Amino acid sequence: AEDRVVIHNAVDLANFAPGPPRLASTLRIGIVANFQDVKGHDDFLAMARLLRDSAVDAKFVLAGEDVVEGGTLGRTKQLAADLSLTESVDFTGHVRDVPKLLQSLDIVVSSSRVEPFGRSILEAMACGI
């Protein structure tokens, strides 16, 4: 029998750590995920519209890119426009410094339809978000 080693999913706590406290009154709510239909960006934007309709002062950050080139990014940008969210939404594209991005957010959302507990949530928790 072969010796096997299980390497558990982990987060480098030296890089993913709490940043300085945010003092701005506008909430920054984000999602960090590649643009694929299963990641639920449309649900994230529906939530954003509900919050705007409830007069919540927030900016919505969508970090990631369409790595599979399935058109999800384009559809998501169109949905943001259709929901009149263009002024409230920031599409960052690929982010090199994910810890810095997470530290700039107040809330991180996972709207994935296939991941019950994705890595982005572990990284956000390590940053105190």
Image (cartoon, rainbow, N blue to C red):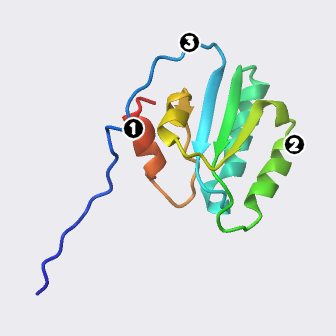
At horizontal 73% and vertical 68% (from top left) the residue drawn is 70
Q: Quadrant of residue 91?
A: top right
Disc 1 marks a residue whose amino acid type is Phe
Q: Which residue is mark 2?
A: 81
Q: Would you place residue 103 above or below residue 116 in this image?
A: above
Determine which residue is flagged by label 1.
16
Locate residue 55, reporting x and y percent. Answer: 75, 19
Q: Residue at image x 72%, y 50%?
A: 42
Graded by Cα atoms within 10 Å as few (under 14), some (14 to 19) or many (20 or more), the crowding at tag 2 reads few
Helix, strand or loop at label 2? It is: helix
- The outermost residue toward the bottom is 1
120 lies above or below 104 = below
Q: Nearer the viewer, mark 2 or mark 1?
A: 1
Q: Position of residue 110 (x, y in %)?
A: 54, 46
Q: Position of residue 28 (x, y in %)?
A: 62, 27
Horizontal side of 81 relative to 66 (left or right) equals: right
* Front residue of 98 and 75: 98
Q: Secondary structure at mark 1?
A: loop
Real-space CA distance between mark 3 and mark 2, rounded to the nearest whole angstrom: 29 Å
**Tag 2 or tag 3, which sits nearer the N-term?**
3
| Rendered view: 82 above or below 8 | above
Which quarter of the rendering shows the N terminus?
bottom left
The amino acid type of the residue labelled 3 equals Leu
Q: CA distance from mark 1 to mark 3?
A: 20 Å
Quarter of the view holding residue 108: top right
Can you identify the residue that label 3 sits on? 23
Task: Give the SS element for disc 3.
Answer: loop
Disc 2 + disc 1, Cβ < 8 Å: no
How far apart, in angstroms, are the residues tagged by discs 2 and 1? 33 Å
